[in-house]
Amino acid sequence: MQDKLTGYLAANFPPNTRRAPKLVSGPIQITWKEWVNPQLGQRSRDPVEAQDGSIWWVGQFGNLMGRLDPKSGEMKEYQLPPNAMPHTVEIDPKGNAWFTGNKNGSVGYLDPKTGKTIVYKMPDPNAKDPHTLVFDKQGIAWFTLQNSNMIGRLNPENGDIKLVTLNTPGSKPYGIKIDAEGNPWFSCNGRPCLYKVDAATMALTEIKLPLQGTTVRRLDIAEDGKIWYVNSGMGRLGMHDPKTGETKEWPSPSGPRSHPYAIVVVDGIVWYNESGMRPDPLVRFDPKTETFQSWAIPSGNIYAGIIRHMRATRDGTLLIHQSSTNRIMQVTVHKRAAAR
Amino acid sequence: MRNRSAAWVAAAALVSIAPFAAYAQGQPGALPEGEAKPLVEGLCVSCHRTNLITASLGYTRDGWKELIGTMIDRPPTPTCRTS
């Protein structure tokens, strides 16, 4: 049966270059490490490091959260409440693993010590799809609700949830990060905008992005306060400087259909992926020299896709994943011998 | 492990109803005719649509084996896990 299946697939869908990326060579060397998650086809995504060095991820289709010990390679998967269909996992200051219940309007966490799951339902029936979540330094959880067009704030001390709906329908709040002053910023996957949230009042300030057609999956904030974002809709990388108000964009190497998706800034270097291409490239951008370098992300002996969210570990490695091939991965960037 | 074999059984059961879920020719994700077309329609649409297959990078036989080994279980268990 499987021979018939693979024979049919190989005959009808042999290797092609229809979505081939433009890979850019360069001097930086990286090493990939991968772990294949136990439950098949789970849509593994969003790996993140906890304080104890373990790595958590979610299986969105598998309705599960997983914990990996990167030293031993041991993995444990925890089934989540029915229909949570977790979009992401984030670790709170106490080491609890929080998930967003993207299909059942909830946010919850798993206490790894007890294995118990605590769930908070959204207080508004219109708040249907908690999406990406981050903690501020006070331990408050901030999260986006893409299709509900809201952002939320949850206080884990008392379970209190506050929600704010955006004025413009279809803005699709997506990625969210906290700046050095403790104010959240989020990006719009529905139109050309970024927003700053006043952490005290939840008042929203919109930053309009320059190009029509811009949609922004994710953003990250560099140490110097600059906001880096992917212009997913137009295949570009962008930077907004809140200090000067300047916004600048660069075409991504693989062009307008490259659909940049996940993004993280580590030690002043911007990393993102071009999810519209196959293979799915990991791209490095050095803001000082304004130069790119990119690599095709391998999955065992093959290539597929895609990274949907990436974060750094404390020691500066990148945690990425491939949602198609059930893998979470770690990228180590080699230190260059010559001082810069 | 429990989930892997369950997925296989559920997917195999779908094969029999596959013709009713057939994608019309010419639509995005439409599958070419072939002996294994019902198999794909049965096994491969429970998690996503066939457009992921038709728009994929394409693979050799070994490549397809490795790719779908990360999604469905196919006895005998292939090398779909690292140890």
Image (cartoon, grey):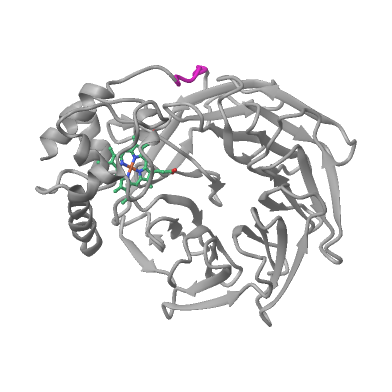
Judge whether residue A56 is colored magenta. Answer: no
Q: Is residue A154 above or below residue A253?
A: below
Residue A80 drawn at (x, y percent): 43, 69
In the rendering, at what x and y percent does residue A114 appear?
43, 81
Q: Which span is picked out in magenta? A: A19-25
Residue at image location 48% in from the left, 66% down from the top? A84
Residue A162: image quadrant is bottom right
Would you say A120 lies left or right of B19 here? right
* B15 vs A108: above or below: above
In the picture, measured across the screen, residue A61 lies left or right of residue A307, that is left
Q: Is residue B65 left or right of residue A36?
A: left
The quadrant of the rendering that contains the N terminus of chain A is top left
Residue drawn where x is 29% and y is 52% of the image: A40
Looking at this rendering, what residue extends furthest in the right direction? A244
Q: Position of residue A138 (x, y in %)?
A: 73, 69
Quadrant the C terminus of chain A occupies: top right
Residue B28: quarter of image:
top left
From where the camera sits, is residue B73 visible? no
